[in-house]
Image (cartoon, rainbow, N blue to C red):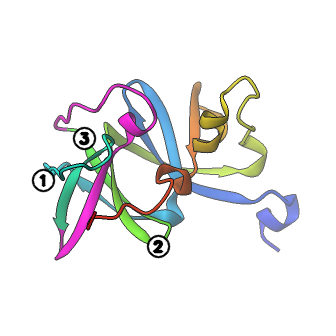
Amino acid sequence: MSNEEKSGAKVHELIAFKIGEQDFCIDIKSVREIRSFTAATPLPHAPAFVTGVINLRGTVLPIVDLADRLGFQPTQPHARSAIIVVKVQEQLIGLLVDGVSSILTVSDDLLQPTPDVASELSRSFVNAVMAVEGQMVSLLTAEAILPEKIDLAA
């Protein structure tokens, strides 16, 4: 019997990253790869948080500025910026972040619910919060990043 089975607490592996000075993470199961920043080709009439598209081995990959999508100032790409390729609602998208910091292994008992004082919109994006090495880290819900599939043909 594993430690997880004995304690009854489910263990999660999460990719931790920064947006500005804030720490976030996303479930590693939704992550396909992590790439260095690549400038995107803008798309006319795309939502403001979609910076454009890149060619990912022959596939058109939309890039979402995660800071802009979460209501922060848009990302100004720099040398440490990264694109986290995730599968959301059966679609691959790239999430532009300020930098990937680590892989976290946490158990359910470390995850705290999003505080009630947060707006409904905040709670739709942030599944849980946790304290890791003295920092508050927000666990994002990948499915909430795109309210619906981005239609590149529109």
Residue depicted at 75% across the width and 50% down the height? 108
Q: Which mark is residue 81?
A: 3
2 and 3 marks in contact (CB < 8 Å): no
115 vs 9: above or below:
above
The answer to whether residue 133 of the structure is visible from this angle is no
Q: For the residue marked with disc 3, what is the amino acid?
A: Ser
Q: For the residue marked with disc 1, what is the amino acid?
A: Thr
Specify whether 40 is left or right of 132: left
Query: Is 87 or 146 nearer to us in this picture?
Result: 146
Residue 90: image location, x then y, percent: 47, 73
- Using the numbered discs, state the Cα–Cα distance from disc 1 to disc 3 in whole angstroms: 17 Å
Q: For the residue marked with disc 2, what is the amino acid?
A: Glu
144 vs 76: above or below:
below
Residue 51: image location, x then y, percent: 24, 46
Q: Secondary structure at mark 2?
A: loop
Q: Which mark is residue 94?
A: none
1 and 3 marks in contact (CB < 8 Å): no
148 inside magenta stretch: no
Q: Which residue is mark 1?
A: 41
Residue 67: image location, x then y, percent: 38, 35
Magenta region, residue range:
56-79
Query: Is 47 or 60 nearer to us in this picture?
Result: 47
Residue depicted at 87% across the width and 64% down the height? 6
1 and 2 marks in contact (CB < 8 Å): no
The answer to whether residue 122 of the structure is visible from this angle is yes
Q: Secondary structure at mark 3?
A: loop
Q: Which mark is residue 90?
A: 2
Residue neighbourhood size for the residue with mark 1, other residues' Cα within 10 Å, grouped as few (<14), some (14–19), many (≥20):
few
